[in-house]
Image (spheres, helix red, strand yellow):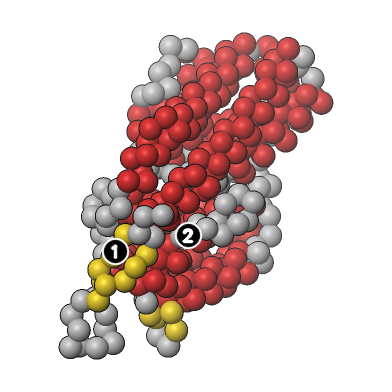
Amino acid sequence: MAVTVVQCKKKKDPEIEEEEISFDKPGMLSNYSSNVVIPNLQFAKNSLDSFALAFNNFKLNKTVSNLLVVRQKFIQAYTDYQKMELFGIGPGENEIIYANFNTFPTDTNQIQSNITNGGYNLAAVSNLDAKGFPALDYLLFSPGLSDADIVNLFVNIPARENYMTDCLNEMQSKASIILSGWVGGYQSTFNSSTGSEIGSSLGLLVNNLNFQIDLMKNAKVGIPLGKKSLGQKLPEKCEAIYTNSISVSLLKSCLDNIENVYRGRSLNGSDGLGLDDYLDALGAQHNTGTLNDAIKTQFSITRAKVNLINEPLSLAVINDDATVDAAYIEMVKLLVLLKTDMPSQMGIVITYQDGDGD
């Protein structure tokens, strides 16, 4: 197996300016592409396809029982999508995963306008917040309506069924393009880019991992908690607000995937070469221990705080904001370790802008 020699600066001995270390960076990138990225994309795509199949069955036989099946498949697909969202690299960047699949809160007025007027273009920027999982969340769990009422909407308004079909078709198409792009050639490109410069595979991976943490901290938690609105709580901006029973579950799934990517961990839980191993090879220190240990400890602390939040998040930010805020604070600490300390040790430049100063 090829071994890349990585140069890093050590702080232990000022007389030694540079010290070479050996680390199998090609092996790490291969583990990510073969055992993490592609399996996660396939897993999320399979779940999305299962959801689409359930909706097709519902279209043939519009009953409340079939609607309930569609909803179950939707919740599973939305949960499994969290395994895919981080990989806005290569084909995922081309298809703009997050913006096209999960821009929330959704624009219900735009959705209704599209359904009523037709002639919409889902690829238009104006429709980014009128499609994807958040739009389907609204169509399947419309507020103030009974299950029978929602079934009747699909029965009496064919354009509603067509709109949901078009949204699903676009999501399936993009998921297929992303997966086939990795399998069809980008995997080799990713594996062979062993540097740490801007645009390298390591640089892209670290940037996307941190971008996902920023999204988790801000979009999933901070904005509903009022961190961007001078303390005014905005529960209506929670993820999956119309389902209104899975927002914390989606948060947990997102956090789990971030840690799995950090560790180079596969879907079956096997630890392969990951960013954690690279930090250890670099001898990265934090306070009196290793940076890797500090990051893993912070993942555990953050998860413990998130686990204390009760569903739905829309109620928790109002009735138990201290618990949500405690989790938010730990997310900030985790982000600092992964966005500041880790990249500086690896020689990685963070190139995206989040605009909140962490």
- Give the residue at the far right of this rendering: 65
User: Hey, which quadrant is residue 67 in on the image?
Assistant: top right
Image quarter (top left, top right, bottom left or bottom right) of the C terminus: bottom left
Q: Residue at x 63, y 24 (%)?
A: 52
- Give the residue at the far front of this rendering: 1
* Residue 309 percent location from the top left of the image: 65, 63
Q: Residue at x 36, y 44 (%)?
A: 190
Instruction: Reply above or below: 5 against 261.
Output: below
* Residue 216 percent location from the top left of the image: 48, 55
Instruction: Reply above or below: 86 against 275.
Output: above
For label 1, count other residues whose C-alpha is less than 10 Å away and answer few (under 14), some (14-19) or many (20+).
few
**If you read the primary sequence from the N terminus, does the residue marked by circle 1 or circle 2 appear first?**
1
- Viewer-nearest residue: 233 or 207: 207
Q: Callout 1: helix, strand or loop?
A: strand
Which of the labelled discs sits on residue 273, or is there none?
2
Q: Nearer the viewer, mark 1 or mark 2?
A: 1
* Residue 276 percent location from the top left of the image: 46, 66
Side (left or right) of 27 relative to 189 = right
Where does label 1 land, which residue?
5
Q: Residue at x 43, y 62 (%)?
A: 275
The amino acid at mark 1 is Val
Q: Residue at x 27, y 57 (%)?
A: 196
